[in-house]
Image (cartoon, rainbow, N blue to C red):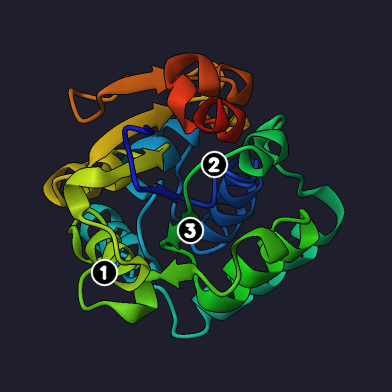
Amino acid sequence: MPSFDLIILDCDGVLIDSEVISARVLLGHLASFGVMADMHDFRTRFLGRSWPKVAAEVRSASGVTLPDDFEAAYRRTLLEAFEHELHAMPGVTEVLAQLAVPACVATSSSPPRARRSLELTGLLDRFAPHVFTASEVEHGKPAPDLFLHAARVMGAEPARCLVIEDSMPGMAAGQAAGMQVWHFTGGSHLAGGSVGHGGLAHRSFDNWTQFFDMEPGLRASARAS
């Protein structure tokens, strides 16, 4: 029998190789307001956080309060870039097609961004309507609220859930929810940077082709046999 009853996947940086695009667009928009940040800042200060937390971090670190329309302008530019550049993580489609247990998405992205991202990469039909966003809970990652909400809706006990995340806040949220956490490090945004998980993950992997090697029981064919 599989070790888990539900797999909860982050979207950006796990299912889709979007974070490197997000970093470029966000850092460019921040620079136009005099906030200078680099890829290291993106990985350590912004990655995996909801927009309110990102804006608060910018205000705390730089003293700059971003205008009310900053988020909308940033997201508009980002979605335009996604239309031409976004793709699914290599190998993830094949893994999803062979899973022996249900899977859902739990993301800090806004609902429109999450839906369009999955649509562009051909993954929306695989998950809809089970795409959960931080807008549905009071506290986003690193609080456990979003993962607990997803498990509750999907009818799974937290201890029987596997969370796959690329960010420290996401891994912290999964651990706080009492779930097993795997750290995916195969996104382009982590290339050349620190990919440690700070003890927040039970396992790490950088390629979706490794997934069933780590847990063979999660493959549908293994369960059938």
The Cα–Cα distance between marks 2 and 3, rounded to whole angstroms, is 12 Å
**How many neighbours does mark 3 have within 10 angstroms: few (below 14), some (14-19), or many (20 or more)?**
many
Residue in the picture at 32% in, 59% down: 58
Q: Are marks 1 and 3 in contact (CB under 8 Å)?
A: no
The Cα–Cα distance between marks 2 and 1, rounded to whole angstroms, is 24 Å
Q: Is residue 175 left or right of residue 155?
A: left
Task: From the image, tell me which residue sits under label 1.
Answer: 152
Can you give x and y, in whole percent of width and height, for residue 152 in the image? Answer: 26, 69
Instruction: Tell us which disc is closer to us: 2 or 3.
Output: 3
Residue type at mark 2 is: Gly
Q: Secondary structure at mark 1?
A: helix
Residue in the picture at 45% in, 50% down: 10
Instruction: Tell us which disc is closer to us: 1 or 3.
Output: 1
**How many neighbours does mark 2 have within 10 angstroms: few (below 14), some (14-19), or many (20 or more)?**
many
Task: From the image, tell me which residue sits under label 3.
Answer: 105
Q: Nearer the viewer, residue 198 or 163?
A: 163
In the image, residue 24 above or below residue 122: above
> Residue lying furthest bottom in this view?
68
Can you give x and y, in whole percent of width and height, for residue 217 in the image? Answer: 44, 26
Task: Name which quarter of the figure residue 146 lies in.
Answer: bottom left
Instruction: Tell us which disc is closer to us: 2 or 1.
Output: 1
Task: From the image, tell me which residue sits under label 2.
Answer: 13
Residue in the picture at 74% in, 65% down: 119
Label 2 or label 3, whichever comes before in sequence order: 2
Q: Identify the image quadrant of the C terminus.
A: top right
The Cα–Cα distance between marks 1 and 3, rounded to whole angstroms, is 13 Å
Residue type at mark 1 is: Arg
